[in-house]
Image: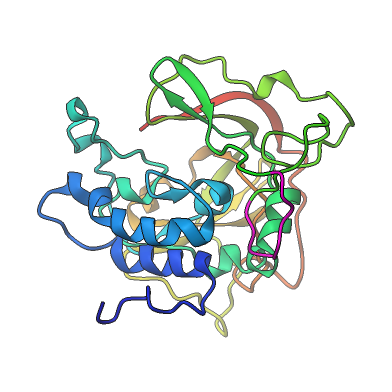
Amino acid sequence: MVGSPLPLFKENPLRRYSTCVELYSGRQLTLYSDKLMAFRGIDKTLGYPLAVSFLYGLPDSYFDWALLWELKSPGSFKGHEVDQAYGKFFPSWSWSGWDSGVEWRLSTISGVLLHVHEWLVTRTWIVWYKGTRGSHEWVWLRRSKAGPSHRWYGYSCGSDDDETDPYGRRRPYGRKTLNRKTEPQATPKEGCLHFWTYTAFFTLSRKSMSGAAFKSSLDPGLHRFGILDSKGDWCGTVVLDKTWLDAVGGTFEFVAISEAKDFALEECDAGRIISLKSEIKRSGIFTMHS
């Protein structure tokens, strides 16, 4: 327990979870397949105060937030190297699938942390399904009809009046209007996420809005790239390892998973926000493979 964040019981459990993952995720194990097994004692300790179950190390009642982890330093995906014959594999959407430490970067989630529950209800929209052997299942299942007790509460339990989606978000168009396109049509595959959302195409750029007076600090090997729309207008940034420098000028499809933002100096030029509405299009079912 020396140096462990677990005794810090006064800290809210979601922060404690992220602290544990940030400390643990970069450690080198003799057997990579033990990565989640070795974390199981910690997730059992944190699972009760969070009122969650864990899916490949991510808390299910905060799933939209949990997916916002980023690599702290350059790393490679190793989840496919784990022995799938024994049910041991880790998907790319979980920190467990990577051989590098991860973090929830403050420049991405600072706005989320003001009121996590409100953000989950009003700034997320995906009905997350997980592939299992033979069927699709919701990542999170309502456990109680009790209302939220504090701003760190996860998804809303909602109601059974058809005015909320399975994650307790208020449906924008009234009763019984769940868009059936949210239901997966692809063949379920264990370890995959199935979901329906928006995508847009952007060009990777070296362009940065950070001036000489401000430079964001990133670990060696990482670089903050600009992204440009079809007209060449700067729209924001993405942090990738420096091997992507060879891909500057290429156009890539970006998948929107939530509205998490913080217009810090490296993200916004003098308060100028460029609308992305012209770039966004509706899309079909997306499957993130392990």
In this view, 245 is above or below 284: below
Expressed as whole percent of the image width and height from the top left, the position of residue 197 reads 65, 33
Total labels drawn: 0
Q: Which residues are magenta?
A: 145-154
Position of 145 compared to 286: left or right? Answer: right
Residue 148 falls inside the magenta stretch? yes
Residue 279 at x, y percent in the picture: 71, 38
- Compared with 246, 195 (above or below) is above
Principal secondary structure, stretch drawn in magenta: loop
Q: Is residue 120 left or right of residue 56?
A: right
Left or right of 167: which side holds 221? left
Q: Identify whether 216 is placed above or below 133.
A: below
Dividing the picture into quadrants, the one containing residue 1 is bottom left
At 73% from the left and 34% from the top, the residue drawn is 165
Q: Residue at x 50, y 50 (%)?
A: 52
- Most foreground residue, 221 or 70: 70
Percent of width and height locating residue 274: 75, 55
Q: Nearer the viewer, residue 126 or 139?
A: 139
Q: Quadrant of the C terminus?
A: top left
- Compared to residue 124, the image places residue 102 above or below, namely below
Q: Image quarter for residue 222? A: bottom left
Residue visible at 38% across and 26% down in the picture: 190
Image coordinates of residue 61 in percent, x first then y, are: 56, 48
- Name the residue rendered at 33%, 63% in the picture: 73
Given residues 135 and 200, the one toward you in this image is 135
